[in-house]
Image (spheres, coloured by chain):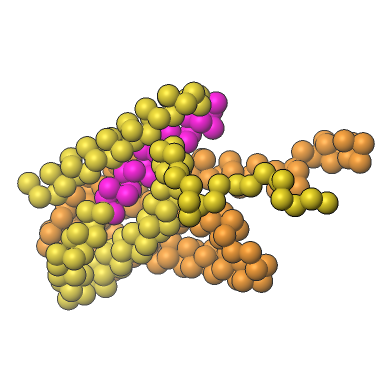
Chain colours: A orange, B yellow
Amino acid sequence: MAFRTPLKQARGLGASHHGTAHWWSQRLSAVGMVPLMLWLVIGIAGNAGGSYAETTAWIASPLNAVLLALVFGVLFYHASLGLQVVLEDYVSHRGVRLALVTAVRFLALLLAIAGIFAVLMIAFGG
Amino acid sequence: MSLDNRPLSPHLQVYRLPFTALTSISHRISGVLLAGGALALVYWVVAAAAGPSSYVVANQIFASWPVQLLMLVWTFVLFYHLCNGIRHLFWDAGYGFELQTAQRSGQAVIVGAALLTGVAWLVALV
């Protein structure tokens, strides 16, 4: 305690330098995922084996399009936060760990944008 | 410095994990598996956006029995992660730490996930 400066205590960010930000984002996205996933499973189950016209009509309806775009955003955010913790726990080599965490972040962003773009294409009759 | 008297963490090859520890590591494993499921979701929506012919191919892949089996596993894994995630949120809020409560909530998570999986597939197949 004697080695801590008052500034460090005031900031309250701890050894990680980002405090509880990662932890809090993970929980916040987790809470959002609960209703989104229940909605998604019901939607996919209801569309199982549907034709092209049926499926695109379902995705194109405004409510479904908005929620599905939201799913891609929240899902890949939550997944990249979770996979980052797994990598940080099990990959001991610093360089490899940094490369993998970076790759997961980039890939998650790419897939989220691909998913959202596909939803918009269908919704706007692309 | 004597090294032979230091406390050791459980030696995973000979230590039988208690039920609560099994539900804990399963949460992590299920999260990683679901990241794979997210790829399938992106593929499904992108295939629908790409047009009828690519959607038909995607539908054939999803209708094949190995992928159907995979989807069944993914459904259970998703609901496990969802239910156990809620259990974790209760812990984050400071509730449910008593040994018997943690045991019971773990059992409830597995039963709940199995029931929700059954309901989802009933909706999909009927």
Whether the magenta-drawn stretch holds residue B83 is answered as yes
* A23 sits to left or right of B40: right
* A102 sits to left or right of B95: right
- Residue range of the region highlighted in magenta in the rendering: B74-94
| Residue A32 at least partly seen | no
Looking at the image, is A95 positioned above or below residue B84? below
Residue B87 place in picture, x, y as percent: 43, 33
At x 32%, y 49%, the residue is B77
At x 10%, y 50%, the residue is B125
Tell me the chief SS of the magenta region: helix
| Residue B16 at least partly seen | yes
At x 31%, y 43%, the residue is B79
Which of these two is toward me, B66 or A119? B66
Residue found at the far left of this picture: B126
At x 45%, y 44%, the residue is B17
Q: Quadrant of the N terminus of chain A?
A: top right
* B38 sits to left or right of A48: right
Whether the magenta-drawn stretch holds residue B18 is answered as no
Residue found at the far bottom of this picture: B53
Looking at the image, is B22 positioned above or below residue A88? above
Residue A44 place in picture, x, y as percent: 22, 52
